[in-house]
Image (cartoon, helix red, strand yellow):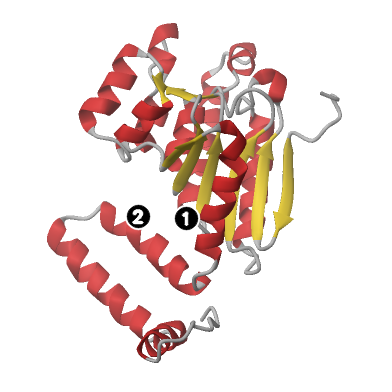
Amino acid sequence: MNDEAPILLREDRESVAWLTLNRPRAYNALSIGLMTALQAELESIGENADIRAVVIGAAGRGFCAGHDLKELRANPSRQFYESVFAHCSKLMLTITRLPQPVIARAHGIATAAGCQLVATCDLAVAADDTRFGTPGVNIGLFCSTPMVALSRNVGRKQAMQMLLTGETVDCATALSFGLINEAVPADDLDRSVEALAAAIKSKSSHVLKIGKKAFYRQAEMGLEEAYRFTGQVMVENMMARDAEEGIDAFIEKRPPVWQDA
């Protein structure tokens, strides 16, 4: 790859922003530069109402191998380490808080912070030869920040298995764990991601924004509090023009015409 090539690519196609991690020789390791570029692009997308969904994929032989270990070892100071992991946590929170749904398009490998990135995205589709793992324990660095997203997507026993053994799991196992939504042949990966994005962008973006925000907020609440909160969300949603339109269209047996409001 040309050393002058951008480390993050973006292509907007039919209201979907396709972001491509572009450090293929480093298995798209999340360097400070790549995280900074991805953060900036996501913040820009969050302000763009014309973008209705986001896909995060990667160039080369693998999705993402995690943090850039060479960069970490080249800067062995507490201050730098604090900066790296704070930056990564901010990036993951930005994905969760983005108004648009985010789909991970995984292939090859997704390990450590790369597995965290897959787990953080709202949805994930993977080529069926992809392997996933949190192998930090193998090099003396427990995957503590990847654990946050992993443990919120898969069962405790499954998360602990991945974290404690450091062993990778195949795509079928990741699917059974709930880490990904679909496992498809590599040749069908783009087609499957496009179909998922198309299903999303056909809905009211206003309603999806309400729902995504509520989903993550209620997940951190107790049961009674969650019902109180989501009851109010339902009330506010019912007041939206798109709720009126959607319900009327259903009753009248016609397609809805969304106003995204």
Q: Position of residue 57 (x, y in %)?
A: 61, 38
Q: Is residue 177 left or right of residue 85?
A: left
Q: Is residue 172 left or right of residue 59?
A: left
The structure residue drawn at horizontal position 16% and vertical position 55%, both measured from the top left corner, is 222
Q: Which residue is mark 1?
A: 97
Q: Is residue 212 left or right of residue 36?
A: left
Q: Position of residue 254 (x, y in %)?
A: 46, 86
Residue 214 tag number: none
Label 2 sits on what residue type? Tyr
- Mark 1 to mark 2: distance in Å? 8 Å
Q: Say above or below: 252 vs 255.
A: below
Q: Say above or below: 36 vs 214.
A: above
Front-most of 98 and 246? 246
Label 1's element? helix
The structure residue drawn at horizontal position 46% and vertical position 29%, both measured from the top left corner, is 115
Residue 216 tag number: 2
| Label 2 packing within 10 angstroms: few (<14), some (14-19), many (20+) | few
